[in-house]
Image (spheres, rainbow, N blue to C red):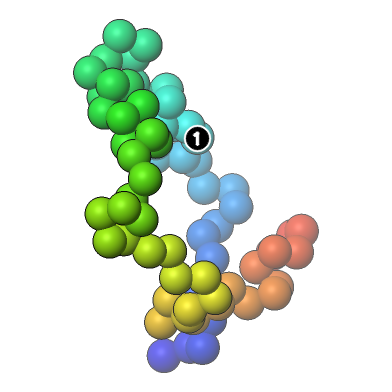
């Protein structure tokens, strides 16, 4: 098992559109739910954002971010 997450092939075609917005129509009920969730203060309900805590997932190797293979 490697210490780093293996990157995807950069020449691979997308399975999904680059943006999830391409799937959701302007008149979709999902837009109402999204707008509601954006306005809710989750801290009032006891949720807190934990900044700086490790996600228990390995980091990407720096070579993954360079151009080329």
Image quadrant in which the C terminus is located: bottom right
Front residue (pair 1, 48)? 48
Disc 1 packing (10 Å; few <14; some 14–19; many ≥20): few
* 49 relative to 54, above or below: above
Instruction: Name the residue at 48% across, 78% down.
Output: 53
Instruction: Name the residue at 43% across, 26% down.
Output: 21
Residue 57 visible somewhere in the drawing: no
* Residue 27 image point, x, y percent: 30, 9
* 39 relative to 61, above or below: above
Image quadrant in which the N terminus is located: bottom left
Instruction: Name the residue at 43% across, 64% down.
Output: 49
* Residue 51 image point, x, y percent: 52, 70
Instruction: Name the residue at 37% across, 45% down.
Output: 41
Residue occupying the far right of the picture: 67
Residue 34, image quadrant = top left
Residue 61 visible somewhere in the drawing: yes
Residue occupying the far front of the picture: 44
Which residue does the numbered mark 1 point to in the structure image? 18
* Residue 32 image point, x, y percent: 28, 21
Task: Give the left or right position of residue 48, taking residue 65 as reference.
Answer: left
* Residue 52 image point, x, y percent: 54, 75
Residue 39, image quadrant = top left
Task: Give the left or right position of residue 49, taking residue 29 as reference.
Answer: right
């Amino acid at each position: 098992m490697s210490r780093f997450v293996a990157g995807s092939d950069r020449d691979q075609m997308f399975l999904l559109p680059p943006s999830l917005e391409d799937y959701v129509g302007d008149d979709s009920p999902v837009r109402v739910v999204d707008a509601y969730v954006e306005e809710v203060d989750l801290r009032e309900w006891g949720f807190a954002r934990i900044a700086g805590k490790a996600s228990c997932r390995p980091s990407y190797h720096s070579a993954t971010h360079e151009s080329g293979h």
